[in-house]
Amino acid sequence: MQETLLSRAERSVPRLSAALNDYYQLTKPRIQVLLLITTAGAMWIAGKGHVEPLLLLVTLLGGTLAASSANAFNCLIDRDIDLLMERTRRRAIPAGRILPWQAALFATALAVASFAVLASFANLFAALLAISGIGFYVVIYTLWLKRTTTQNIVIGGAAGAIPPLVGWAAVTGDLDWSAWVLFGIIFLWTPPHFWALAMMIREDYRKAGVPMLPVVAGDEATARQIFIYTLVLVPVTLVLYPLGTMGWIYLLAAGALGLWLTHGAFRLLKAPNDRKESRSLFKRSIFYLMLLFVAMGIDSIFLFA
Ligand code: HEM
Ligand SMILES: CC(C)=CCC/C(C)=C/CC/C(C)=C/COP(=O)(O)OP(=O)(O)O
C-alpha cells in the first residue's frame, strides 16, 4: 500500500513539473530577457545611475508579470493559427495540454498580480502603463491587426516599446523626452527584428493565412522596408547624445552598433531570397538591442558618477 502511494507520488512529480513548464512556456520566457534589459536600462537612465535596488526588483517583477500575461493571452487567442504553423504547433494550448479557460484564468491572474505589484510598490502610473501594454498587445495587435494587415507589427510593435516607459515611470512618476526616444528606438527596431524572422518562416505564415509582409509583398519589398526602418532607427538612437541623456561612450557604441545593423540590413537587401541573410539579421537585431541598452547602462555609470 505504502509502496503504491510512493510510486504514485513519484509519478506525479514529473507530471507536475511538465504542467508547470507548459504554463511557464505560455509566458514566452525567451523574449522576456530583452524586455527586462530595456526596462532596467530605462530605469537606470531615469534615475541618473542611482536606482533603489528594491524598486528595480519590484518593477522588473511587475513588468515580467505584465508581459507574461500579454503573452499568455496571445497564446490563447492565437491557438487556431498556432496549430497550423510548424514553429508553434507544439505549444501547450494547440496541443491540448492546457485548456483555453485555464489559460484565460492564468493570464488574468498574471495581469492582476502585475497591477498589484506595480501600484503598491512602484506607482499607479507605472501600473497603468503596464496594463495598457497588455491591452494594446492583446486587443490592437493580436485580436485586430495581426490577421488583417501587413502593417500589423509596425503599429502593434508599440506594445513591445512600452516596457521602458514602465521602467521610467516607476522611477520618476513621469515621462520626459528621453523616455519617448527609448520608446521610439524599440518601435523602429521592431520591423527589422520581426520581418527578418518572418522572411525565414514565410511559408508557415502563408499556411496559417497571416498577412505578414513577406507573404503579401515578397522578400524584395520586405528587405527594402527593413533597410529603410534601419536607416531611420540609427539616427534616432544617436539623438540621446545631443539631448544630454547619454554621453560619448554611448554615442560611440550606438554609432558602431548602428553600422553593424545597417551592414546586416544592406546584405539582406542585396540577397533578399537568401535565408542565411535573414536569419543572420534576425540574430543581429537581438544582439543589437541588447548591446545598445547595455551601453546605456555603462555610459550612465560614468556620466552620473
Ligand atoms: C510586435 C512586435 C514583435 C513581434 C511580432 C515579435 C515576434 C517574434 C517572434 C515570432 C519570435 C520568435 C519566437 C519563437 O520562436 O518562439 C521572436 C523572437 C524574439 N523576440 Fe520578438 N517580436 C516583437 C517584439 C519584440 C520585442 C519588443 C522584444 C524585446 C525587446 C523582442 C525580443 C525577442 C527575442 C529576444 C527573441 C528571441 C527568442 C529566442 O531566443 O528564441 N521581440 N520575436
Ligand atoms: C508592458 C507590456 C505588457 C508590454 C507587452 C510586451 C510584449 C508582450 C511584447 C511581445 C512582442 C512579441 C513577442 C510579439 C510576438 O507576437 P506573435 O503573436 O507575432 O508571436 P508568435 O507567433 O510567436 O505567437
Image (cartoon, rainbow, N blue to C red):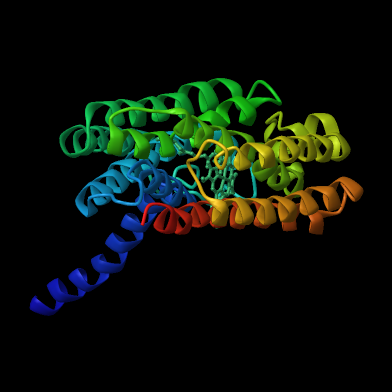
Position above or below: 196 against 141? below
Q: Position of residue 227 (x, y in %)?
A: 79, 40
- Residue 24 visible at all: yes
The answer to whether 198 appears left or right of 21 in the picture is right
**154 relative to 15 in the view: left or right:** right
Q: Quadrant of residue 215?
A: top right
Whole-percent x, y for residue 3 in the image: 13, 79
Extreme bottom residue here? 3
Which sits in the foreground, 96 or 129?
129
**Number of numbered discs:** 0
Q: Is residue 30 at least partly visible in the picture?
A: no
Task: Relative to 212, say whether 83 is above or below.
Answer: below
Q: Quadrant of the N terminus?
A: bottom left
**What residue do we see at 68% from left, 56% from top?**
256
Which residue occupies the foreground of this view, 72 or 22? 72
Q: Residue at x 57, y 47 (%)?
A: 89
Percent coordinates x, y for residue 202 in the rendering: 75, 42
Q: Nearer the viewer, residue 65 or 173?
A: 173
Q: Looking at the image, which residue is at 78% across and 53% down? A: 264
